[in-house]
Amino acid sequence: MGLYIALEGGEGSGKSSQAKVLARRLDAVLTREPGGTPLGAELRKLLLSPDLPSVSARAEALMMAADRAEHMAVVVEPALAAGRHVVSDRSVYSSLAYQGGARGLGVDAVRSMNEFALAGRLPDVVILLQASPEVARSRMKSLPDRLEAAGQRFHDVVASTYAELRESEPDRFVSVSADASFAEVETAIWSALEPRLP
């Protein structure tokens, strides 16, 4: 059975780039949430589009959960069953931080919403990349998506919710400072992950 590894963190923390490098190093299946399946790609366009009309927090959370259910069924579970490691750019913990914390739905409510989508399968390891606001802003795209453009207070709540999740599940979470150079962050991720590999 493979290991299910999720990279988490706020916008500009370098998750996507580090996930690609880690997946290559492990010869793992690289995927992402939202958007790791054909259905998910369409949901991602809707969820992240700056042009999306106002959408309620519950609807946003349910769309994320729908993406997650398809992602688990089509990508994650088959890869793990085949003995492959899976490296995912985001997971259910993003929904707990973004919709549960920053959107104000409550972590427990969003967790319950996702239990059905996940069928009980959580990441084995969550690598939480923590970047200071200054560093994160310097890495942001010039044209932010809908969530990136949500404002500093929103992203502060995302960061504090991630910290609370890390404290509540210390055996699952590994924290890595994302303020260093790309190579240094890559090395820190590997040093933290290697002892957990089967």
Image (tube, rainbow, N blue to C red):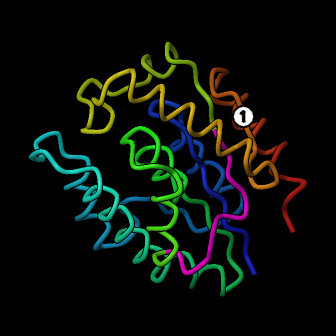
Write the start and end of the magenta stretch as one range.
118-128
User: Could you say which is closer to the camera, residue 189 or residue 46?
Assistant: 46
**154 left or right of 183?**
left
Magenta span has 119?
yes
Measuring 51% from the left and 53% from the top, which residue is drawn there? 90
Q: Secondary structure at mark 1?
A: strand
**5 left or right of 106?**
right
Q: Which residue is most to the right?
A: 195
Q: Position of residue 73 (x, y in %)?
A: 47, 83
Name the quadrant of the C terminus.
Answer: bottom right
Q: Which residue is mark 1?
A: 176
Q: Position of residue 161 (x, y in %)?
A: 56, 38
Q: Position of residue 115 (x, y in %)?
A: 52, 73
Q: Quadrant of residue 18?
A: top right
Crowd class of label 1 (few under 14; some 14 to 19; many from 20; radius 10 Å): some
**129 left or right of 17?**
right
Magenta span has 13?
no
Measuring 34% from the left and 58% from the top, which residue is drawn there? 61
Q: Quadrant of residue 125?
A: bottom right
Query: Visible in this render: residue 89?
Result: no
Measuring 90% from the left and 54% from the top, which residue is drawn there? 195
Measuring 60% from the left and 49% from the top, which residue is drawn there? 7
**154 left or right of 13?**
left
Q: Is residue 134 above or below residue 6?
A: above
User: Could you say which is closer to the camera, residue 67 or residue 81?
Assistant: 67
Name the quadrant of the N terminus.
Answer: bottom right
Query: Visible in this render: residue 46?
Result: yes
Amino acid on which the number 1 mark rests in the picture: Val
Q: Quadrant of residue 180?
A: top right
Q: Is residue 144 above or below residue 50?
A: above
User: Could you say which is closer to the camera, residue 114 or residue 26?
Assistant: 114
Q: Position of residue 11 (x, y in %)?
A: 44, 33
